Image (cartoon, rainbow, N blue to C red):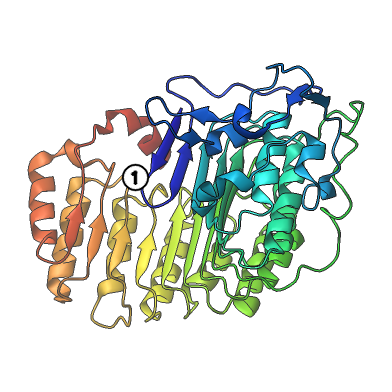
């Protein structure tokens, strides 16, 4: 259950194949054994040396009894962790394990954190200045996320704090994902990388349970977010329309943002999506990479053209975004024209958008002689492309003599329908670019192809 990787990287995960259970609401706090000197430590067999492992601090198991060593923790206020005496909370003293404080990366994957374990983790984090990267993945934090935010705020105030990357994902969150994101960037203004994912809409803990009346006011305050140092922001959204103004407030405070990824984001209208894009144009001038995955952009074609005309973006991804579901005959020429006039865009990824043979041949015009495009990476995977269309695409590239333009990805297309033609197309393409393909059985995708006819 414990892995200590080289270079100060601590990875904790449960042994496979145990699945992550659906965690109930936090149980009432149990009696928590106070660690006292060597009694709370583990000793390596045969080493003869004391081993106060970080594992013991994060995952202390309640219920072990020592006469005179037990106490009732009770509810601890979120703001109390940073400056409290550990002994008054029944938490282990950490000064004896300074060598573990040099670990720079902590990753907890699918390890359920009880309230007791979360308290211990928060106590550790609040002053762990050597920590550079923290990953908490499907730990069932629930309302303990508020304690975590307070401990991270306390850590951010420590001299020499090095935390620059936070990866947080869970099934549920007591806060909507955008409110949680705002709270994180407030608590950690020096963060460079933030990746956050919530699979299901927020479920606040039962208010009938003592201590679960809702998030503290300082966590969800409406005050403006101060300028932060975010360079990379990745967000995975649950179902349901997201309030565009909340996302815009995060983007406006992130002037150093270079990479933005939105997965499964849904907005109430194309106008809301346009508001997000306008914010990017006005406030995120350093943005170079933009990725949208599993978003319905069929009604946002003008907004897509707006992005393709952006002369600061170097890579754009529209993955499974239903781009060509409506008006393909009109939209494709507009899209190609926008790309031909963009000399800064280097990479375009369009997997899963039902491009088809006709769309691929239209896209070939991006590489024509009158184009100013510098495109050198193209991903057209999962686009219902057949061998004859791919062969004609290769011939057009040869005709225009643009030379090698980089990488072409062709995964999960219908190339098995005519293996001879597919091999000839790939042979010709390899004189122009580096081709990455696969041997995929397209029979399972026939129904999807018929729906595009």
Left or right of residue 16: residue 28: right
Q: How many marks?
A: 1
Left or right of residue 228: residue 263: left
* Spot occupied by residue 194 in the image (x, y as percentages of width and height): 58, 57
Residue displayed at 13% across by 46% down:
422
Q: Which one is in front, 342 or 242?
A: 242
* Spot occupied by residue 235 in the image (x, y as percentages of width and height): 59, 52
Q: Which one is in front, 82 or 366?
A: 82
Residue displayed at 69% across by 71% down:
253
Q: Which one is in front, 380 or 420?
A: 380
Q: Which quadrant of the figure has residue 193?
A: bottom right
Q: Which quadrant of the figure has residue 187?
A: bottom right
* Spot occupied by residue 67 in the image (x, y as percentages of width and height): 76, 17
Residue displayed at 45% across by 32% down:
2
Which residue is disc 1 drawn over?
A: 382
Q: In this rendering, is residue 433 above or below 314? A: above
* Spot occupied by residue 299 in the image (x, y as percentages of width and height): 59, 56
For label 1, the crowd category at 10 Å Cα-Cα, with few meaning under 14, some 14 to 19 and many 20 or more, is many
SS under mark 1: loop
Q: Which quadrant of the figure has residue 338?
A: bottom left
The reply to whether residue 63 is in sight is yes
Left or right of residue 43: residue 449: left
Q: Which one is in front, 124 or 197?
A: 124
Q: In this rendering, is residue 145 above or below 303? A: above
């Amino acid at each position: 259950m414990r892995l200590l990787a080289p270079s100060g990287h601590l990875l904790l995960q449960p042994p496979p194949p145990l699945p992550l259970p659906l965690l109930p609401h936090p149980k009432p706090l149990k009696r928590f054994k106070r660690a006292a000197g060597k009694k709370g430590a583990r000793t390596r067999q045969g080493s003869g040396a004391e081993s106060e492992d970080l594992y013991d601090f994060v995952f202390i198991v309640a219920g072990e009894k020592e006469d005179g060593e037990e106490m009732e923790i009770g509810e601890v206020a979120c703001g109390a962790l940073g400056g409290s005496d550990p002994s008054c909370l029944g938490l282990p003293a950490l000064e004896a394990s300074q060598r573990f404080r040099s670990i720079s990366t902590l990753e907890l994957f699918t390890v359920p954190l009880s309230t007791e374990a979360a308290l211990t983790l928060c106590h550790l984090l609040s002053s762990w200045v050597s920590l550079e990267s923290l990953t908490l993945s499907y730990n069932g934090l629930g309302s303990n996320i508020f304690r975590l935010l307070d401990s991270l705020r306390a850590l951010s105030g420590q001299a020499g704090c090095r935390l620059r990357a936070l990866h947080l994902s869970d099934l549920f969150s007591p806060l909507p994902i955008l409110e949680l994101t705002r709270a994180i960037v407030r608590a950690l203004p020096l963060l460079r990388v933030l990746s956050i994912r919530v699979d299901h809409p927020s479920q606040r803990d039962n208010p009938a349970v003592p201590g679960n009346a809702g998030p503290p006011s300082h966590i969800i305050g409406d005050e403006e977010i101060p300028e932060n140092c975010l360079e990379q922001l990745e967000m995975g959204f649950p179902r349901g329309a997201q309030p565009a103004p909340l996302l815009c407030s995060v983007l406006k405070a992130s002037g150093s943002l270079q990479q933005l990824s939105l997965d499964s984001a849904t907005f109430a209208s194309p106008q809301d999506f346009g508001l997000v894009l306008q914010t990017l144009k006005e406030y995120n001038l350093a943005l170079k990479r933009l990725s949208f995955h599993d978003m319905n952009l069929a009604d946002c074609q003008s907004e897509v053209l707006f992005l393709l005309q952006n002369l600061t973006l170097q890579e754009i991804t529209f993955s499974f975004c239903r781009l060509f579901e409506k008006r393909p005959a009109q939209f494709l020429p507009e899209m190609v024209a926008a790309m031909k006039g963009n000399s800064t865009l280097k990479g375009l990824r369009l997997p899963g958008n039902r491009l088809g043979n006709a769309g691929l041949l239209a896209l070939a015009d991006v590489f024509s002689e009158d184009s100013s495009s510098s495109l050198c990476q193209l991903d057209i995977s999962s686009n219902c492309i057949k061998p004859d269309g791919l062969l004609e695409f290769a011939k057009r590239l040869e005709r225009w003599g643009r030379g090698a333009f980089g990488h072409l990805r062709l995964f999960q297309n219908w190339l098995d329908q005519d293996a001879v033609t597919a091999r000839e197309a790939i042979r010709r393409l390899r004189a122009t670019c580096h081709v990455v393909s696969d041997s995929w059985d397209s029979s399972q995708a026939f129904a999807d192809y018929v729906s595009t006819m």
